[in-house]
Amino acid sequence: MNEISPPRPNNLDAFWMPYTNNRGYKTTPRMLARGEGMYYYTTDGQEIIDGTAGLWCVNAGHGRREITEAIQKQAAIMDFAPTFNMGHPIAFQAAAMVAEHTPAGLDRIFFTNSGSESADTALKIALAYQRARGQAQRVRLVGRERGYHGVGFGGISVGGIGPNRKQFGAMLPYVDHLPHTHLPEQNAFTRGQPAHGANLADHLDNLVALHGDTIAAVIVEPMAGSTGALIPPVGYLQRLRDLCDKHGILLIFDEVITGFGRLGTFFGSERVGVTPDLLTMAKGLTNAAVPMGAVAVHDKIFRTIVDNAPEGIELFHGYTYSGHPLAAAAAVASVDVHVKEDLAGRARAMEPYFEEAAHSLKGLPNVVDIRNYGLVAAVEMQGRAGKPTDRGMRVFHRCFDAGVLTRSTGDTIALSPPLIVEKHHVDRIFETLGEAIRAEAA
């Protein structure tokens, strides 16, 4: 184990922290100094079990030597090379490795730098495809209430989380939304996929009746994560797939969270048994060691855009760092770790124990719902009158102070540990969460 560096004074003024109460944080800062395996360590040496895989992303655990060494090696060989009208070998290697595990047919990989960029890229590809196949009137995009697709203007336009939108005025035009699938009156305390709610997909028929043949694509998360882990009802995604096929609409799965083993399969689409036309990814792609995202695109979409374009550039889109050498090296090493250690299989094997531990909190004060799927669990608590999110944030703080990192989304505590988690980690995570919930109710 590495020696922990002694704390040093920090200037907390310059860094404007994302998605953070900056004023509140700077009164009681929490600093993580390093990570190893299932744990973070704070600047004062406290051990913190990582119950959230960082931010849904460190699926193989922290400090993976294989990934670190691959990044170091690549940095010594070549730190950067552009991918506009030229290439470098490891970007092609990374794309090929990813394509080996994406759903059948989705074997064209477009690299980005984040999940937000992946969402915007997928939306643009969908629009370009509809135009290339002679359906230029299809300019409308459909998201879902409570959906999260990053923070680009495309992503927040199709996204359905109000606070992510309200500060920024007008969104993209020609956007509509399906209803969310959270039905606590019928599905509370469900283990795995809830029984009720497949019919909510039928609202797409209503949107087609309203907008005609102007809808280009529908984008949903197979399991909505950032809104508090909403599990897809049995049959819902299959019905949505069938309706998209019926109406000539592309189906995009946002698998930034559900990709790379989180649901017990390499991609969540395999777990739910539905193949989309495009699939976004990020987070676990590199085990979060270097920022990287990607969109897996069905070959029919790629061929339609490329073959119908005039001579020259076929898609006027991309990023300076698309296929960045260090990120590509991290992706190659990360995918290799996933395959060699069968991390998806480990997640599936641990799921029953994880599920039992999560639902053991049923009956605690203010707990109104518990849901789980794969190695994801959400414990939803009744919010305080006039103080939304207050209970969730207080429970989050209590857990951290007791040595467990959780994720507070409103008054829901979400858990998504690294896929290397063992039973004793699961026990400590949920015991600590239970104690925090009881203490907050006192």
Image: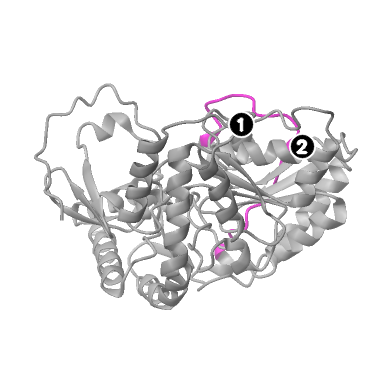
- Going by the picture, which residue comes out furthest to the left? 6
From the image, which quarter does the N terminus lie in?
Answer: bottom left
> Which one is nearer the viewer's eye here, 17 or 106?
106
Q: Distance between the residues labelled 2 and 1?
A: 26 Å
- Residue 172 in magenta stretch: yes
User: Please, is residue 132 above or below residue 273 in the view?
Assistant: above
Callout 2: SS: helix
Q: Can residue 64 be seen in this view?
A: no
Query: What residue appears at the point 28 percent right and 29 percent down from the top-left corner?
Result: 23
Q: In terms of image quadrants, where is residue 346?
A: bottom left
Q: Which amino acid does label 2 sit on?
A: Leu
Q: What residue type is labelled 1?
A: Met
Which residues are the magenta region? 164-184
Q: Where is residue 94 in the image (x, y as percent from the top left)?
A: 53, 49
Query: What residue appears at the point 80 percent right and 61 percent down from the top-left corner?
Result: 242
Query: What residue appears at the point 34 percent right and 26 percent down from the top-left corner?
Result: 16
Callout 1: SS: loop
Q: Which residue is labeled 2 in the image?
A: 127
Q: Where is residue 340 in the image (x, y as percent from the top left)?
A: 43, 67
Mark 2 vs mark 1: give the one in front.
1
> Which one is nearer the viewer's eye here, 308 or 396?
308
Residue 39 located left or right of residue 193 = left
From the image, which quarter does the C terminus lie in?
Answer: bottom left
Residue 63 located left or right of residue 232 = left
Q: Which residue is labeled 1 in the image?
A: 86
- Residue 122 in magenta stretch: no
- Going by the picture, which residue comes out furthest to the front? 77
